[in-house]
């Protein structure tokens, strides 16, 4: 409590998060000469990548795009992606002297009567004229609720704490989810588990052929439209479909990727459907995605009736001081890079247009 009695440190911009989106934003802020601080809750560089399971090697990573100003070259595709990208992010921070403060947990962002923003954290409080939120989704795994879930006597895990296939040796595993992570888990676990079952809400859509620039623009436009309407962003796979790689083809041919519709309830020993079908399981693995980690912004009341935050570009419509980078249409490595630069350009105009509020009593 004592730290809040001290006067907040004043900066022009606070960046929350130091993954791809946060580092891109910090790079552009530094180039523009804008006074800022970067706060990251992770223990070391690497963003959410540092928490990925060991068997997700760099060669399996889909669409990792280099940060602005520094390419990622010479990486060993057989090394874990957590190591490769963690080392790359650390080198990037050093090269551009980004001086990320970590580990720092941001608990709340509030509006001050002076027109500034008050950013409360485990390392103190900052007063800022604008904020770039780059917190991503990894900290908010989505666990659906199903009847009987509390009765299950086995183990329940989420992609966020997936340990790798060796933990499932000899087990009967139900994997829930229709995204890329679910497919990757199934293809791995099939080599160690006694039995795997894939369950999704909707039939998976597999995309054959190249995913080019035109397809990418269309996917981004569809996600952007939802965000513009104040709806929660959809998952990328919900827009693009699942890539039909050689490994996926083999999984389909072998039956590993044979999909069942969503079960109706969970039992003590597994899952069950209304038509009488039952599957016994030792583990239920929820590959059900993530939600944007935005709880610290709740005091600003940014959400729309549709449940999302309405954004134009990266700027929040309800508060032009707030920019969401790595949210919605910019939730990809290349999208985060571009959004970081776009956010800084808008913030620069905001800082130029809006004079610093006079101190109280001044």
Image (tube, rainbow, N blue to C red):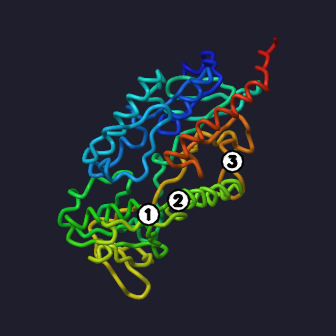
Q: Position of residue 49 (x, y in %)?
A: 39, 43
How far apart marks 2 and 1 lie (CA) works out to: 8 Å
**Measured along the vertical axis of the image, is residue 150 above or below residue 14?**
below
Viewer-proximal residue among 25 and 318:
25
**Measured along the vertical axis of the image, is residue 223 above or below residue 117?**
below
Q: Earlier in the sequence, mark 2 or mark 1?
A: 1
Q: Position of residue 238 (x, y in %)?
A: 53, 65
**Measured along the vertical axis of the image, is residue 358 above or below residue 236?**
above
Residue carrying label 2 = 235
Residue, x 27% and y 52% (percent of image)?
55
Residue, x 32% and y 75% (percent of image)?
252
Residue carrying label 1 = 179
How far apart marks 2 and 3 lie (CA) works out to: 17 Å
Q: Position of residue 179 (x, y in %)?
A: 44, 63
Viewer-proximal residue among 219 and 106:
219
Q: Are discs 2 and 1 less than 8 Å apart at CB?
A: yes
Residue 311 is marked as: 3
Neighbor class of circle 1 (other Cα within 10 Å; few <14, some 14-19, many 20+) is many
**Quadrant that contains the N terminus:** top right
Q: Earlier in the sequence, mark 3 or mark 1?
A: 1
Query: Furthest-top residue in view?
Result: 362
Quarter of the image for residue 248 reads bottom left
Residue 289 is marked as: none
Q: Secondary structure at mark 1?
A: loop
Q: Secondary structure at mark 3?
A: strand
On the picture, is 261 further left or further right than 268? right
On the picture, is 199 further left or further right than 1? left
């Amino acid at each position: 409590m004592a730290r809040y009695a001290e006067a907040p440190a004043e900066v022009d911009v606070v960046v929350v998060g130091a993954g791809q989106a946060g580092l891109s934003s910090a790079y552009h802020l530094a180039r523009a000469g804008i006074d800022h601080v970067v706060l990251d809750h992770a223990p070391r560089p690497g963003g959410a990548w540092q928490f990925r399971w060991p068997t997700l090697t760099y060669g399996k990573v889909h669409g990792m795009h280099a940060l602005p100003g520094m390419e990622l070259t010479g990486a060993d595709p057989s090394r874990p992606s957590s190591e490769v990208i963690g080392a790359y992010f650390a080198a990037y921070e050093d090269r551009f002297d980004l001086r990320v403060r970590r580990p720092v947990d941001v608990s709340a962002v509030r509006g001050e009567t002076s027109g500034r923003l008050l950013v409360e954290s485990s390392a103190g409080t900052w007063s800022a004229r604008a904020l770039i939120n780059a917190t991503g989704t990894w900290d908010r795994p989505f666990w659906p609720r199903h009847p009987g879930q509390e009765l299950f006597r086995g183990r329940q895990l989420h992609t966020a704490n997936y340990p790798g296939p060796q933990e499932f040796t000899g087990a009967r595993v139900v994997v829930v989810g229709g995204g890329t992570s679910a497919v990757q888990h199934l293809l791995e676990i099939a080599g160690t588990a006694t039995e795997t079952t894939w369950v999704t809400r909707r039939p998976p859509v597999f995309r054959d052929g190249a995913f080019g620039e035109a397809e990418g623009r269309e996917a981004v436009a569809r996600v952007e439209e939802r965000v513009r309407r104040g709806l929660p962003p959809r998952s990328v796979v919900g827009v693009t479909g699942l890539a039909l790689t050689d490994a996926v083809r083999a999984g389909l041919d072998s039956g590993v990727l044979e999909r069942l519709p969503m079960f109706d309830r969970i039992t003590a020993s597994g899952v069950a459907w209304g038509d009488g079908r039952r599957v016994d399981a030792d583990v239920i693995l929820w590959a059900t995605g993530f939600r944007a980690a935005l709880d610290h912004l709740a005091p600003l009341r940014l959400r729309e009736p549709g449940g999302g935050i309405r954004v134009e570009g990266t700027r929040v419509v309800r508060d032009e001081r707030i920019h969401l980078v790595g949210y919605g249409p910019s939730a990809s490595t290349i999208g985060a890079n571009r959004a970081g630069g776009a956010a800084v350009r808008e913030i620069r105009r905001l800082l130029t247009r809006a004079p610093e509020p006079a101190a109280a009593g001044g």
